[in-house]
């Protein structure tokens, strides 16, 4: 019996945590693009944890980059590919620390040059592999090893920052909505230039959740407005791809994750306020810059 999945990027029997959101994301990216891709991965769980088959579980060529440099390493790989007349996508695949914080200068530079790469940020909202320090993607109220009483500041608006670079495509993706996820990766694959994909990636040890909760929590994040699903073409067409009939209250989302066990009323109110503001902003942007030709072309 052939148990190999032809399109997989990450082999089974790898040593990632059970229920890891990042592993699911890699599987869906393989489903969308196949495994004729090359990847640049900086210091993060994605380069540290997937051992086995001997010593790495990746089925595709991977260059391990320094923490800050995956986007420019990917751009270099793409340049070599073009010189050699080779085809295939080059993906920079980085955590939130490598994206929101330390990689920001190189990502901004690569986006401004419109480098022909797909940049994927799997956002587990913490510096996962080094012991759960806070990042600027950590939401208000979350306990990390450097915010033992809950983080006081809100999450950085990475999508807003990337959209302002006028890149051809930016989208948010949820492992709880596979069809939407795979369609967006396919869309990214059809576009040239710098494409930015932001994935919320539940993290078992650091969100302090059960492995079986990953997908449920990812779906709840969408339906509570914590992580709205949308895509933006060329800074001028906003398309919300999943509109919950009613935004659900946050309580269940918070209760399922022990990282929020110390959230107090004022932090919870701050979080709820940010979610509301963000959602209303998004609705307004879609109204002002509605889906048009580009959205129709790729949907
Ligand atoms: C310049 C530099 N500073 C610090 C480190 C140590 N370091 C390696 S990975 C990492 C955290 C990565 O966090 P993130 O990008 O969110 O990915 P995750 O581990 O959560 O997957 C840190 C601090 C490093 N490798 N290089």
Image: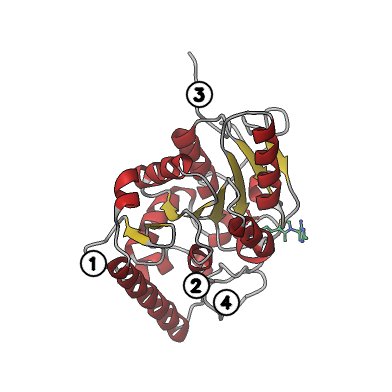
Q: How is the image coloured?
A: secondary structure
* Nearest the eye: 29 or 18: 29
Element type at marker 3? loop
Q: Residue furthest top?
A: 1
Q: Residue at x 50, y 61 (%)?
A: 166
Mark 2 CB near ligand 1 (8 Å cut): no
Q: Nearer the viewer, mark 2 or mark 4?
A: 4
Q: Residues within 10 Å of mark 4 (few under 14, many from 20)?
A: many
Q: Which residue is mark 1?
A: 246
Q: CA distance from mark 2 to mark 4?
A: 12 Å
Element type at marker 4? loop
Mark 4 CB near ligand 1 (8 Å cut): no
| Quadrant in the rendering for residue 125 | bottom right
Q: Which residue is mark 2?
A: 261
Left or right: residue 227 compared with residue 90: left
User: Which of the two labelled residues, at mark 1 and mark 3, occupies the earlier sequence position?
Assistant: 3
Left or right: residue 186 compared with residue 142: left
Circles 2 and 4: CB atoms closer than 8 Å: no
Numbered mark located on residue 6 in the image: 3
Q: Which residue is mark 4?
A: 151
User: Which of the two labelled residues, at mark 2 and mark 4, occupies the earlier sequence position?
Assistant: 4
Point out residue 40 in the picture as x, y percentages from the top left corner. Answer: 67, 44
User: Which of the two labelled residues, at mark 2 and mark 1, occupies the earlier sequence position?
Assistant: 1
Q: Residues within 10 Å of mark 3 (few under 14, many from 20)?
A: few
Q: Residue at x 41, y 46 (%)?
A: 184
């Amino acid at each position: 019996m052939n148990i190999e999945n032809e399109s997989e990027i990450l082999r089974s029997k790898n040593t990632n945590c059970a229920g890891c959101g990042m592993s699911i994301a890699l599987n869906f990216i393989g489903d969308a693009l196949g495994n004729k891709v090359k990847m640049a991965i900086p210091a993060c769980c994605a380069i540290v944890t997937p051992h086995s088959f001997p010593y790495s579980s990746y089925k595709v060529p991977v260059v391990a980059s320094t923490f800050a440099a995956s986007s420019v390493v990917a751009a270099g790989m793409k340049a070599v590919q073009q010189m050699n007349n080779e085809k295939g996508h080059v993906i920079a695949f980085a955590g939130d620390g490598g994206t929101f914080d330390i990689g920001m200068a190189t990502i901004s530079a690569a986006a401004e040059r419109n480098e022909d790469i797909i940049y994927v940020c799997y956002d587990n909202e913490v510096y996962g592999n080094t012991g759960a320090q806070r990042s600027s993607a950590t939401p208000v109220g979350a306990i990390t090893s450097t915010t033992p009483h809950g983080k006081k500041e809100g999450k950085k608006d990475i999508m807003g920052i990337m959209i302002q670079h006028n890149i051809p495509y930016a989208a948010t993706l949820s492992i709880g909505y596979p069809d939407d996820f795979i369609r967006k990766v396919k869309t990214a694959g059809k576009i040239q230039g710098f494409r930015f994909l932001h994935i919320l990636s539940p993290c078992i040890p650091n969100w302090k959740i059960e492995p079986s909760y990953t997908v449920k929590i990812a779906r709840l994040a969408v339906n509570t407005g914590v992580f709205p699903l949308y895509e933006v073409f060329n800074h001028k067409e906003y398309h919300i791809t999943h509109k919950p009939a009613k935004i659900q209250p946050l309580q269940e989302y918070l209760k399922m994750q022990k990282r929020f066990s110390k959230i107090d009323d004022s932090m919870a109110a701050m979080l709820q306020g940010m979610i509301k503001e963000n959602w209303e902003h998004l609705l307004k942007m879609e109204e002002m810059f509605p889906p048009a030709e580009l959205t129709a072309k790729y949907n």
